C-alpha cells in the first residue's frame, strides 16, 4: 500500500485520533530501493507514532499462479526483509495474511455487500486484466473486496495510501458504509488516510526516469535490490542513465531532467536533506562527482540491511516463530470484528 496523501486527506486525518495503522505488502519477490524509500522506512518511523499492523498479503498473490514452494519462500523472504529494514515484531504486529483465516471469511461476507459495478470500475482491474478479462482470475476481480476485509477487520483508524491506492480506500469506505446501513449496525470503522511517518520518496527507474522503479522491469540494472552487493550497487549507479549537463543549484531546473531529478531525489531521501541542500553541495559539478557520493550513501544504507536479511533467511525457524507470534496477535485483534460482522448478517448462533 503506497504512501502519498492529498491535502484533503491530511485535513481529515488531523481530526481523527490515530488508534491503529494498518498496511500490507505482497510477497512477490526481492524488495528494492523503491520499496524501501517509498514505503518500508516510512513504516519503520510509523512504529514510533502509533500501534501498527503489517501483513504479508499472500492471499492476494493467489490472483496469479505461483508455484507453492515459491510462494512459501517469498513469504519468509519478505518477512526477513521487513525485519532487516527495521520493522520490529515486538513493537508492531507482523504476520502472514493466510495465517489469519478471518481475512478470507470476512471477504466472503463483504462479497454480499460489494457490487459488480463497483469492482468493474476499479483501475487495477482494468489495467491488469487488459483485453483478456475473460481469462483473468476471479481473485483479481475480487481483489478490492479482500483488501477491504484486510483493512476493516482490524478497525484501524488510519491506512497509509498513495495516489494509486486512493480508489481502494474509497471503495473500502463505501463497502463499510453500505454494510453498516444495510444491517443497521456500526460494525465497521471508516478508516482515514494516514499522513504520519514522514515523507515517502518516489523512486524512479535507473534506466528511465519517467517510470517507477519496479521488480517487474526486465532489466536488473533499472533497480537497486536490497540483496545487491556493494559492488553491484556501485556499478548500477555508475551506469545509471543521466545527461551531460552539470547539476544546477535550483531544483526547479531539474524539472525537464527526469534521470537527474531521480538521482538527486534518492540522495535526498537517504540523507534526509532537501533537494536544494543536495544541489548546493554539487552545484556546477557533473555526475562523475555526484554518482560516487550517491553510491557510497546507498552502500552505507543497504549493507547493514543486507547483512541482517541474510542472517534471518538462514534461520527459517526463527522467522516462522516471529510470524506465528504476529499471527496469534492478529487473530486476537480480528476476532471481535469478524464475530460482529457475522452476527450483523445472521451467521452463527
Image: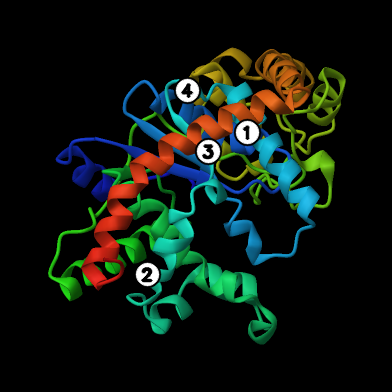
Crowding at label 3, few (<14), some or many (≥20) Cα neighbours within 10 Å? many
Q: Nearer the viewer, residue 39 or 245?
A: 39
Measured in 3D between alpha carbons, the distance from the residue under mark 2 to the one under mark 1, in whole angstroms, is 29 Å
Measured in 3D between alpha carbons, the distance from the residue under mark 3 to the one under mark 2, in whole angstroms, is 22 Å
Quarter placement of the C terminus: bottom left
Crowding at label 4, few (<14), some or many (≥20) Cα neighbours within 10 Å? some
Q: Which numbered marker is on residue 79?
A: 1
Give the SS element for disc 2. Answer: helix
Residue 329 image-quadrant placement: top left
Q: Position of residue 236 (x, y in %)?
A: 82, 31
If you read the primary sequence from the N terminus, does the residue marked by circle 2 or circle 1 appear first?
Answer: 1
Q: Nearer the viewer, residue 106 or 196?
A: 106
> On screen, 158 above or below 90?
below
Q: Position of residue 274 (x, y in %)?
A: 47, 23
Q: Position of residue 181 (x, y in %)?
A: 16, 71
- Determine which residue is flagged by label 2: 109
Q: Position of residue 346 (x, y in %)?
A: 25, 72
| Relative side of 211 to 162, left or right | right
Q: Nearer the viewer, mark 2 or mark 4?
A: 2
| Relative side of 72 to 327, left or right | right
Q: Nearer the viewer, residue 133 or 263?
A: 133
> On screen, 125 above or below 135?
above
Q: Which numbered marker is on residue 274?
A: 4
If you read the primary sequence from the N terminus, does the residue marked by circle 3 or circle 4 appear first?
Answer: 3
- Determine which residue is flagged by label 3: 95
Q: Which numbered marker is on residue 271?
A: none
> On screen, 114 above or below 249?
below
Crowding at label 1, few (<14), some or many (≥20) Cα neighbours within 10 Å? many
If you read the primary sequence from the N terminus, does the residue marked by circle 1 or circle 4 appear first?
Answer: 1
Measured in 3D between alpha carbons, the distance from the residue under mark 1 to the one under mark 4, in whole angstroms, is 31 Å
Amino acid at each position: 500500500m503506497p504512501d502519498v496523501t492529498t491535502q484533503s486527506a491530511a485535513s481529515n486525518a488531523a481530526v481523527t485520533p490515530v488508534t491503529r495503522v494498518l498496511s500490507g505488502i505482497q510477497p512477490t519477490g526481492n524488495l528494492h530501493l523503491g520499496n524501501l524509500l517509498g514505503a518500508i522506512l516510512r513504516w519503520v518511523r510509523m512504529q514510533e507514532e502509533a500501534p501498527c499492523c503489517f501483513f504479508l498479503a499472500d492471499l492476494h498473490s493467489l490472483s496469479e499462479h505461483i508455484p507453492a514452494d515459491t510462494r512459501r519462500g517469498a513469504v519468509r523472504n519478505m518477512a526477513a526483509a521487513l525485519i532487516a529494514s527495521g520493522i520490529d515484531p515486538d513493537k508492531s504486529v507482523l504476520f502472514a495474511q493466510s495465517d489469519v483465516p478471518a481475512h478470507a471469511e470476512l471477504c466472503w461476507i463483504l462479497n454480499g455487500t460489494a457490487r459488480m459495478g463497483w469492482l468493474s470500475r476499479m483501475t487495477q482491474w482494468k489495467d491488469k486484466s487488459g483485453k483478456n478479462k475473460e481469462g483473468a482470475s476471479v481473485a483479481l476481480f475480487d481483489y478490492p473486496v479482500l483488501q477491504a476485509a484486510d483493512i476493516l477487520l482490524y478497525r484501524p483508524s488510519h491506512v497509509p495510501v498513495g495516489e494509486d491506492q486512493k480508489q481502494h480506500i474509497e471503495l473500502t469506505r463505501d463497502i463499510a458504509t453500505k454494510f453498516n446501513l444495510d444491517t443497521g449496525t456500526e460494525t465497521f470503522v471508516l478508516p482515514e488516510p494516514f499522513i504520519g511517518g514522514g515523507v515517502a520518496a518516489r523512486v524512479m527507474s535507473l534506466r528511465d526516469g519517467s517510470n517507477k522503479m519496479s521488480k517487474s522491469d526486465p532489466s536488473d540494472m533499472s533497480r537497486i535490490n536490497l540483496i545487491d552487493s556493494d559492488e553491484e550497487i556501485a556499478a548500477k549507479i555508475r551506469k545509471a542513465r543521466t545527461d551531460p549537463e552539470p547539476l544546477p543549484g535550483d531544483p526547479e531546473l531539474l524539472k525537464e531532467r527526469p534521470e537527474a531529478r531521480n538521482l538527486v531525489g534518492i540522495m535526498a531521501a537517504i540523507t534526509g536533506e532537501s533537494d536544494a541542500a543536495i544541489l548546493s553541495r554539487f552545484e556546477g559539478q557533473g555526475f562523475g562527482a555526484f554518482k560516487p557520493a550517491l553510491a557510497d550513501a546507498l552502500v552505507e544504507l543497504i549493507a547493514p540491511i543486507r547483512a541482517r536479511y541474510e542472517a534471518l533467511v538462514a534461520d527459517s525457524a526463527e522467522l516462522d516463530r516471529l510470524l506465528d507470534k504476529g499471527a496469534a496477535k492478529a487473530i486476537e485483534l480480528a476476532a471481535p470484528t469478524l464475530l460482529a460482522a457475522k452476527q450483523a448478517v445472521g451467521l452463527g448462533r
